[in-house]
């Protein structure tokens, strides 16, 4: 690949091996990795986000990891700004930028642009905060099924923002008539899709979750909760939200593993649907 012109994107479901593949590719093509993960930007969230370790990086530079305090927000607009700057810097060193991660909304935002600007509606946000993520997701799908298919059903903050945009514009604008795949090709971007078979993926999800518990996922969640509070904890991903329910006495410890397995598999199926559209 010509490092001055090209970018490599590695996309896949949770537990599909994106981080390891990115390191392997970086060694082969002299690349640097730009993390496309909306949670790995935060410090403290190590086990729950399966953050790559220094040893696992094998000397390959990684960017956009541990750059925000978990009390702060990091938006798609922040990602586009930071990633755009990094691409220029990495290419100026004669190396290949490698985008790797599972936050598909960030991929869309970087290559296709952000939705039209819609101001915050505090009254509406306060009203929507009273509903669960499941209820908000149903509302999104009824109002704009196309956008609903693109969203993480458990990301309450993004669901509320989507409903905010829908309330003003009727639906979320389509960013670009050109498909993401066509845009990738036109931009001189190579990409790798890791679409693990269902049976193997379920096994990987279970194994990874067991490992996370053994590494101290509950204790990590307890520490994060003590620092950011319950409301923010619920915004940091389903692992932290569900374990937070246990810490508040709302569920038993025995229920954590089966509940998280089910939720993670649901999320992986959602990611698979996005990957199928990308590969068309």
Image (cartoon, grey):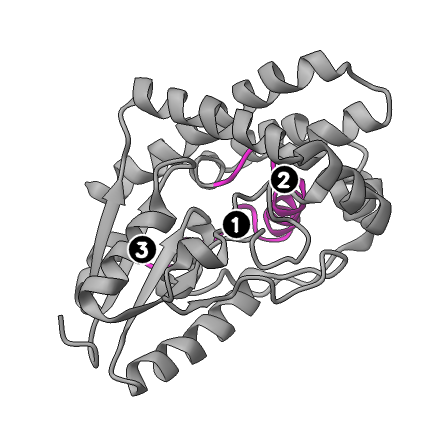
Return the x and y of residue 172 as percentages of the image width and height.
51, 49
Packing grade of label 1 (10 A; few <14, some 14-19, many >=20) is some
Q: Residue at x 48, y 30 (%)?
A: 208
Question: Tag 1 or tag 2, which sits nearer the N-term?
Answer: 1
Q: Is residue 146 above or below residue 61?
A: above
Q: Is residue 275 left or right of residue 103?
A: left
Give the extent of the magenta segment.
151-176
Return the x and y of residue 109 as percentages of the image width and height.
44, 60
Packing grade of label 3 (10 A; few <14, some 14-19, many >=20) is many
Q: Residue at x 55, y 53 (%)?
A: 38
Packing grade of label 2 (10 A; few <14, some 14-19, many >=20) is some
Question: Tag 3 or tag 2, which sits nearer the N-term?
Answer: 3
| Residue identified by numbered label 1 | 51
Label 1, secondary structure: give it.
Answer: loop
The answer to whether any part of residue 108 appears in the image is: no
- State yes or no: residue 41 in magenta: no
Residue 122's tag is none
The CA distance from mark 2 to mark 1 is 14 Å
- State yes or no: residue 154 in magenta: yes
- Which of the two residues, 21 or 183, is positioned nearer the viewer here? 21
- Which of the two residues, 25 or 146, is positioned nearer the viewer here? 25
Q: Is residue 141 left or right of residue 60?
A: right
Residue 237's tag is 2
- Which of the two residues, 167 or 127, is positioned nearer the viewer here? 127
Return the x and y of residue 62 as percentages of the image width and height.
43, 66
The CA distance from mark 1 to mark 3 is 13 Å
Locate the C terminus by quadrant: top left
The CA distance from mark 2 to mark 3 is 23 Å
Question: Tag 3 or tag 1, which sits nearer the N-term?
Answer: 3
**Is there CB contact under 8 Å for labels 2 and 3?**
no
| Residue identified by numbered label 3 | 22
């Amino acid at each position: 690949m010509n490092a001055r012109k090209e970018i490599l994107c590695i996309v896949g479901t949770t537990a599909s091996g994106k981080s390891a593949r990115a390191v392997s590719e970086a060694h082969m093509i002299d690349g640097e990795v730009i993390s496309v993960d909306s949670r790995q930007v935060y410090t403290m969230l190590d086990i729950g986000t399966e953050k790559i370790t220094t040893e696992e990086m094998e000397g390959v530079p990684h960017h956009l990891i541990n750059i925000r305090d978990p009390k702060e927000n990091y938006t798609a607009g922040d990602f586009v700004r930071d990633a755009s700057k990094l691409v220029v810097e990495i290419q100026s060193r004669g190396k290949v930028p490698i985008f790797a991660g599972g936050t598909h909304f960030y991929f869309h935002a970087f290559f296709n642009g952000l939705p039209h600007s819609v101001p915050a509606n505090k009254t509406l946000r306060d009203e929507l905060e009273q509903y669960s993520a499941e209820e908000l997701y149903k509302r999104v799908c009824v109002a704009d099924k196309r956008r609903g298919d693109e969203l993480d059903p458990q990301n309450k903050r993004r669901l509320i923002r989507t409903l905010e945009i829908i309330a003003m514009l009727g639906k979320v604008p389509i960013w670009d008539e050109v498909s993401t795949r066509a845009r990738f090709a036109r931009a001189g971007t190579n990409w790798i899709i890791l679409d693990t078979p269902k049976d193997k993926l379920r096994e990987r999800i279970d194994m990874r979750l067991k490992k996370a518990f053994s590494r101290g996922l509950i204790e990590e969640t307890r520490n994060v909760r003590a620092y950011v509070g319950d409301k923010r904890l619920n915004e940091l991903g389903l692992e932290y939200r569900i374990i937070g329910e246990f810490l508040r006495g709302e569920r038993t410890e025995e229920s954590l593993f089966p509940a998280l397995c089910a939720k993670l598999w649901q999320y992986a199926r959602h990611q698979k649907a996005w990957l199928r559209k990308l590969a068309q």
